[in-house]
Image: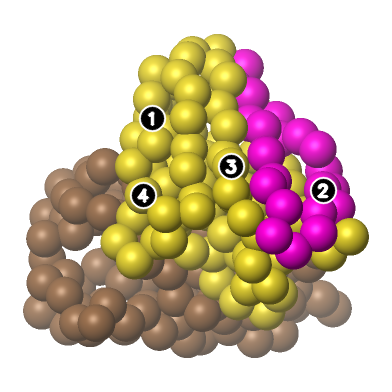
Chain colours: A yellow, B brown
Amino acid sequence: EIMMTQSPATLSVSPGERATLSCRASQSVSSNLAWYQQKPGQAPRLLIYGASTRATDIPARFSGSGSGTEFTLTISSLQSEDFAVYYCQQYNNWPPLTFGGGTKVEIK
Amino acid sequence: QVHLVESGGGVVQPGRALRLSCEASGFTFRNHGMHWVRQAPGKGLEWLAIIWFDETKEYYADSVRGRFTISRDNSKNTLYLQMNSLRAEDTAVYYCARDFKSYTRILSHWGQGTLVSVSS
């Protein structure tokens, strides 16, 4: 089973600043990585797939990069609606599909 | 607009069974793989199972294999999760999710979830 590790667990950022979230896989997952956003009391929402392709209607301030074992989600200028928990998920070696533990982006 | 609505959650005693349903609308259900994912209170996401768009294949997480069964009725646009021999650690919000395409394993759309609480 591929283990996904996200860091940091919590990221404190001021509105308008850049946020950089990391996700590491225990072995290569190629570019088969997705990012999801989850707000309190809501279901997750797909942001990025294929490591760098934005899903439908996702703003351009969200970008993904990386391949192999190291991945990054960048939010270029944080808006109030971006404060949430973010999860990465690999879909290269499965079953099972595996998620990281999440990074909470909070207001500084 | 894709819409997924889970139902069937509730409070159940350990060892008992429960069946969850997920009604789909706004897309051609029979063309997409479907997943179940759960989230224990205050915890992260755990993938549970996938069923192929044409019902020919199913895969499970080790934690539920042999106890849970995923199924679908393409004539009713409905996904199911039969959960047997429930344990306290199965307490979670259960989400159904649509695969991006047939079986990409990208979860493109999610329902709002249904809460299952296993307690005596």
Taking depth in this image into account, of A81 and B114 the one nearest to the observer is A81
Residue located at (12% from left, 66% from top): B30
Q: Report, in whole angstroms, how far the alpha carbon at label 1 lies from the one at label 2.
A: 25 Å
The secondary element bearing badge 4 is classed as strand
Magenta region, residue range: A5-26
What is the C-alpha distance between the residues marked 4 and 2?
22 Å
- Mark 1 lies on a secondary structure that is loop
What is the distance, in whole Å, between disc 3 and disc 2 at their CAs?
12 Å
- What amino acid does circle 3 point to? Thr
- Whether residue A43 is visible to the viewer of this picture, yes or no, is yes
Q: Is residue A84 visible?
A: no
Query: In the rendered image, which residue does mark 2 sit on?
Result: A11
Residue B43 appears left or right of B105? right
- Labels 1 and 3: the sequence-earlier one: 1
Describe residue B45's horizontal placement relative to residue A53 as left or right.
right
Residue B111 at x, y percent in the picture: 44, 76
Q: Nearer the viewer, mark 4 or mark 1?
A: 4
Which chain is mark 4 on? A
Q: Which amino acid type is marked by label 2?
A: Leu
- Inspect the image, locate mark 1, and give the three-letter code of the amino acid beneath it: Asn
> Which quarter of the rendered picture does the N terminus of chain A lie within?
top right
Residue A64: x and y in percent read 48, 38
Give the Cα separation between the discs numbered 4 and 1.
13 Å
Q: Within the magenta stretch, is there residue B87?
A: no
The residue labelled by disc 4 is A54
Is disc 2 on the same chain as disc 4? yes
